[in-house]
Image: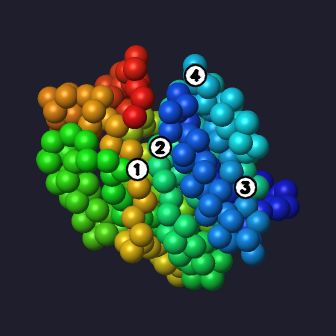
Amino acid sequence: MNEIRTYDYSFVVPAFNEESHLDLTLTALEKCMEGEAGYRGEIVVVDNNSSDRTAEIAKARGVRVVFEPYNQISKARNQGAAQSKGENLFFVDADTIVPPDLFRDALNLMKGGACGGGGSVLSFDRKNGSWFWRDLVPSFWNGVSRNLRLAAGSFLFCRRDFFFECGGFSEKVYAGEEIFFSRKLKKLCKRESKDFVILKDNPVITSSRKLNWFSNWQLLCSTLVVLCVPFAIRSRRLCSFWYRRPASSDG
């Protein structure tokens, strides 16, 4: 914790069996880095006990790869943060494309000193699934995100010291960890007179693949379990929807 930081920022990318998407995500992050050549950055991919070519793909791209044996998104993110060397942390899901303009805006806010952290509204990469899940649910989440200032896990950023002061992502839950972290981070930002922002001009683009993988009924049941039975997020079995990968999960 007391070691000298050598980067202005670190991208932390948790990845569990993401061989079909990781290459696109890393390409987008490299474009973001090229556009901000005045700052030094790194990409840290956390191999969360993958059984496919996730780690191999990341290593071939020349990014740093760390290993987290326990399959839990919170642990993977926390491990990546602990192993990173940037003074600002950008958490990006492995199936997500970050537009260069979005990264530029977020990084400028962080380097300006007035912002302690934040996130972005999102959009899906494809028109998969029914209109309810494809259009209405993301629009609803974006409204909640903007009005309540809650960051989605697909793109969340903060100062490194703030991250550790907040205790990182809760390892007591298997889903919704970004909501708990956003709430803690907002309180810390308010106490330290820093802004917590949700950027909305350049949405982060995340995969809609689950709308193809699972039926409307499966999507509804998984959502209702979390909404109606709050303790369910503490059970890996009840949160298995977020960790399952179909036998054929391309796209």
Q: Are the residues flagged by discs 3 and 2 in contact, CB closer than 8 Å? A: no
Residue located beneath label 3 in the image: 42
Label drawn at residue 206: 1
Q: CA distance from mark 1 to mark 4?
A: 21 Å
Q: Are the residues flagged by discs 1 and 4 in contact, CB closer than 8 Å? A: no
Mark before the other along the chain sequence, 3 or 4: 3
Residue located beneath label 2 in the image: 95
Q: CA distance from mark 3 to mark 4?
A: 23 Å
Label drawn at residue 52: 4
Residue 235 in the image, given as x and y percentages of width and height: 37, 27
Badge 4 density bin: few <14, some 14–19, many ≥20, Cα 10 Å? few
Q: CA distance from mark 2 to mark 4?
A: 15 Å
Q: Amino acid at mark 4?
A: Asp
Q: CA distance from mark 3 to mark 1?
A: 21 Å
Mark before the other along the chain sequence, 2 or 1: 2
Residue 197 in the image, given as x and y percentages of width and height: 44, 73
Q: Quadrant of residue 201?
A: bottom left
Q: How many marks?
A: 4
Residue 63 in the image, given as x and y percentages of width and height: 73, 45
Q: CA distance from mark 2 to mark 1?
A: 6 Å
- Give the vertical position of 95 relative to 179 (above or below): above
Mark before the other along the chain sequence, 3 or 1: 3
Mark before the other along the chain sequence, 2 or 4: 4
Q: Quadrant of residue 182?
A: bottom left
